[in-house]
Image (cartoon, helix red, strand yellow):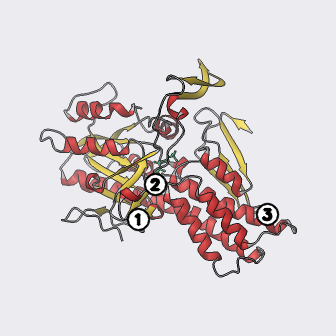
Amino acid sequence: MSSDEKTLKAIKFNKNDVSLDILDQLLLPYTTKYIEIQTIEDAFQAIKKMQVRGAPAIAIVGAFAIAVEVFHYLQDKNSGKTVGDLIKDIDYLVTSRPTAVNLSNACNEIKDSLKKYDSSSLIVKEQSDLILDYAVNLYEDDLANNFKIGDNGVEYIKRVLNAENFKGPFSIMTICNTGSLATSGHGTALGIIRSAYSSLQKDVSKEEFFLEHVYPCETRPYNQGAKLTSYELNYEKIPFTLICDNMASALISTLNKSKAIKQSTAPVKFIIVGADRVVSNGDTANKIGTFQLSTISNHFNGIEKFQKIKFIVAAPKTTIDYKTQTGDDIIIEERPANELTSLKGPVIDGDKIGEKLVVGIAPPGISVWNPAFDVTPHELIDSIITEDPHVFEKNSNGEFELQ
Ligand code: MRU
């Protein structure tokens, strides 16, 4: 069922009847529609088509879908499904999106819990309960951890600004979507922005500085920032201005030289991004465009007269891949050419949302490179904020110690 009613709830799981519905994020920000996920194949398709996206949300939907499918095996006395069959299906699910590590971390943990059973044995209630508990815990822990990331982020922001003796309004830039829609709720990078706005806005802040404005980048080519982050900021009434990714340097340069744009004068003091995979040395895969923001902040930090900017990665520990040593070993998903050469969306006629159209914006059939993510080298990251109260910053050798 579709409606115009806005929501930030990406995942609805009903423990009583073991059912899963996800918000179809391809229809946002115009239409609210949930789709039911009954099988691992349904989840595979929804993840691949990006009806659900964001590293933590993908993992949670994957884990819930496994729980739902296994629950259905038990209802169907003739299913004949074995533990070995299930493990094969879980391996298939992981291939839906290769870069975000949360899904494979969750699937590996479910598989580990099945190791003690003979792979030719039929699925029984004990395994169903075990997977269900795992999925529910994953969801609940993610939610609790996002609030902790938010609190830790606010403490870090306060520490940085107090150390600089900064006073007055500041702004934050971000990319992609890292909010409620990409997680179980609240979000990672956008979670810090939410928490910062609730405790550091002008009339509330107990400090001599306050968060005045947020700049989400549109996040070409799939426009997660324009469609989803803008939708979330709008929903929460946090003051923001959307920019194209290629406006970041111009905006920072203008604001950080104490000039104004019509929306604000507040300099960009933080660029906060999410992560799809943080590897052992701190190199971070995130939405394409993240790396260039880190080079931009590094550039401005080298200029004496400019306000300094901290480049922050915000992610739960489920996004850390301790097994991979450097970013060179991260597999980067390449997406289809049509995400660059066409745009899809409804016809807008005043307030009326019309029929959906696909329009071309490039010559048909041209060569296109469309990596979905890039890797920001740890050298360009100032801090990695997780649910752990200890914010990871580099040691005197310039290395993160994430363990
Ligand atoms: O390709 P998407 O839409 O799944 O990308 C989402 C991101 O890259 C997010 O930045 C990411 O998963 C960070 S975690 C909230």
Within 10 angstroms of label 2, few (less than 14), some, or many (20 or more) residues? few
Q: Position of residue 170 (x, y in %)?
A: 29, 41
Q: Nearer the viewer, residue 82 or 185?
A: 82
Q: CA distance from mark 2 to mark 1?
A: 11 Å
Q: Position of residue 244 (x, y in %)?
A: 39, 31
N-term mark: 3 or 2: 3
Is mark 3 in CB contact (under 8 Å) with mark 1?
Answer: no
What element does badge 3 sit on? helix
How many marks the image carries: the answer is 3
Q: Is residue 116 above or below residue 362?
A: below
What residue is disc 3 on? 72
x 33%, y 30%: residue: 247
x 34%, y 57%: residue: 283
Q: Nearer the viewer, residue 118 or 15?
A: 118
Q: CA distance from mark 3 to mark 2?
A: 34 Å
Tell me the tag on residue 324: 1
Tell me the tag on residue 186: none
Q: Quadrant of the C terminus?
A: bottom left
Q: Nearer the viewer, residue 158 or 353?
A: 353
Q: Is residue 135 left or right of residue 121?
A: left
Q: Quadrant of the N terminus?
A: top right
Q: Is residue 142 above or below residue 206?
A: below
x 37%, y 55%: residue: 284
Q: Position of residue 199 (x, y in %)?
A: 38, 50
Q: Is residue 282 left or right of residue 236?
A: left
Tell me the tag on residue 331: 2
Q: Nearer the viewer, residue 33 or 209?
A: 33
Whether residue 163 can be seen here: yes
* Identity, as a three-letter code, of the amino acid under mark 3: His
* Identity, as a three-letter code, of the amino acid under mark 2: Ile
Q: Is residue 100 left or right of residue 268?
A: right
